[in-house]
Image: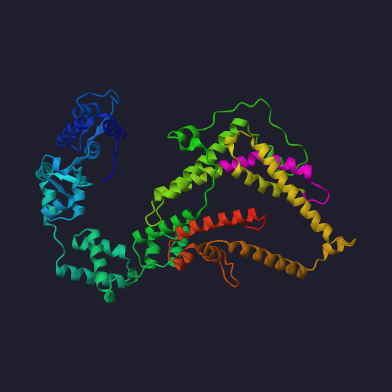
Amino acid sequence: MQRYRNPALKQLSDHQIKYAPRDVQLTQITRAERLLDELNPAGSYRYPELCEKITTYRGEMYPDLVVSGAEAVHDLRCFVEDLSDNADISVENAGEEVWTVEDVSKRFNVSSKTVSRWRDRGLVSRRFRFGGRKRVGFLRSSVERFVLKNSDDVDRGVRFTQLTVSEREELIYRARRLAKAGACPTEISHRLARKFHRSHETVRYTLKNYDKDHPEAAVFPDALNSITEEHKQEIYRGFRKGVPVEELAQRFKRTRTSIYRVLAEVRAGILLDKRVDFMAAPIFDEPDAASTILPPLPVVIRKTAPVKAPPGLPSYMNSLYSVPLLTRDEEVYYFRKMNFLLHQASKLQEEIDPSQPKNSDMDSFEGFIEEANVVKNFLIRSNLRLVVSIAKKHVTSNSNFFEMVSDGNLSLIRAIEKFDFTRGFKFSTYASWAIMKNFARSIPAEYTQLDRFRTGNEEVFDQASDPRSERTNEEFVNKRQHEALMEIVSQLDPREREIIVSRYGLKEGASPETLEQVGLKLGVTKERIRQLESRALQKLRKIAEDEHLDVPGI
């Protein structure tokens, strides 16, 4: 059942659960159920009057609020169920006979789904403790009042029997004809539901159970085979390219629900494989962190006028001066916001169930990542002038200035990702050291490469280099790197070693394998493979640092 539709009634429920004593809660449950019998879903009611009938006092909040009858009926049933759940009522102390959903289903010869529909139409349910477990239950008096008030609905549900043998055979015959004509399962279910005056779910389950019991004569033989991973990826790629779900269902002989489920599973797998790194801070775990961190930054009054770009600069350099430099408070605000958004995304990533993912969770995860990237890009644009100023100091006659700026931009991006704003340092100080350290490594390496083969005719060699020697040198370097890598990989546990070798295709002639492929080989899920791979890479980094190795990619 959906939760509250009106925030005021939700607030009333939360307040009574938090502050009202247990005996008062039991009394309010009885009053709320009695009030439900008096309400007309087509009417409207003032909130203070509803509150007074339940709690015996007229609340001062929302004096002019008017609640529709439908909202009041729905939310008061939620109120009864939530308060009974909090009161922890055992079925032995209920005061009268309690029926479970199964009991009501058997007593009236209806399905459990019909009972759920009765709850939506006004059958009041409570939560009772059956032994050590809480379950939904109905007081006998509540069921009898509902039956008396909704006799037509109950009689219609009781008269609704299962399909007869002849009806079932005709339904299967017509379904087979429609399937041969090219109709998809969803279309067939809806058309037959109208023809036989049955629900769509009844027809769908009848056909599904028939195909399960008679695979050799199945109406939808393709649906009996589990969809392969390749087909899942193909469905996802087609959907991303704009192919309608109806067309995908027709092409793969699946229901629209199955297609949506496949799309959600593939999307969840992609999001779970995404690595989310952030710099943690104690404020992120506080209850009101979002309300403190995410609101817009107050307008900053700058004491200095914007810096004008020097004349004669290229358009790229000229555009850098249009973004003002950040103040100390602005830096803290934006770095805190970016890392908090990534922190929220990381928490949400842990809650995504790959077998039953929720689109709302995945939408929120992607929203956090997108917002964090917006802040990150803003920080990059605000500090590009720093890269240019440092590159000017390190440029030489043999260096390409724009290549140095491009290389420095990569160091800037890495510095933004690793900057810990909680330590109180200015980002410009941290980034300057990171950029200069990168230049200190890259510039001498270029000179070493230039001086290594300097003969006096270097211009000739620069213009006519031998590509064969370059390939030979690359093969030699790759071989040495592979030997060094395999030496430290051999120090891992056997299972971790096999995962790393398989994932990155380290065996001669082998190609990298996906998480799914490695998981099938080892008999575990791809999420478990991802966790073991992450742990193994951390071990490799530690081994490489201890042995002072320089292995790319680790």
Q: Residue at x 17, y 53 (%)?
A: 102
Q: Residue at x 77, y 54 (%)?
A: 445
On the question of residue 528 being in view, the answer is yes
Residue 168, quarter of picture: bottom left
Task: Give the image location of residue 470, x and y in percent.
Answer: 75, 66
Q: Is residue 286 left or right of residue 317?
A: left
Name the foreground residue: 478 vs 372: 478
Name the foreground residue: 164 vs 14: 14
**Magenta-drawn stretch, dominant element (helix, strand or loop):** helix
Residue 122, quarter of picture: top left
Residue 317, quarter of picture: top right
On the question of residue 315 being in view, the answer is no
Q: Is residue 203 left or right of residue 334?
A: left
Q: Give the magenta range.
A: 375-400
Coloration mode: rainbow
- In this view, 106 is above or below 9: below
Name the foreground residue: 329 vs 545: 545
In the displayed orientation, state which residue is furthest to the right. 456
Q: In which quadrant is the C terminus drawn? A: bottom right
Name the foreground residue: 69 vs 84: 84
Q: Residue at x 77, y 42 (%)?
A: 392
Task: Give the image location of residue 519, x and y in percent.
Answer: 46, 64
Q: Residue at x 17, y 32 (%)?
A: 27
Task: Give the image location of residue 161, x and y in percent.
Answer: 13, 60
In the displayed orientation, state which residue is furthest to the bottom. 216
Q: Is-magenta flag for residue 15?
A: no
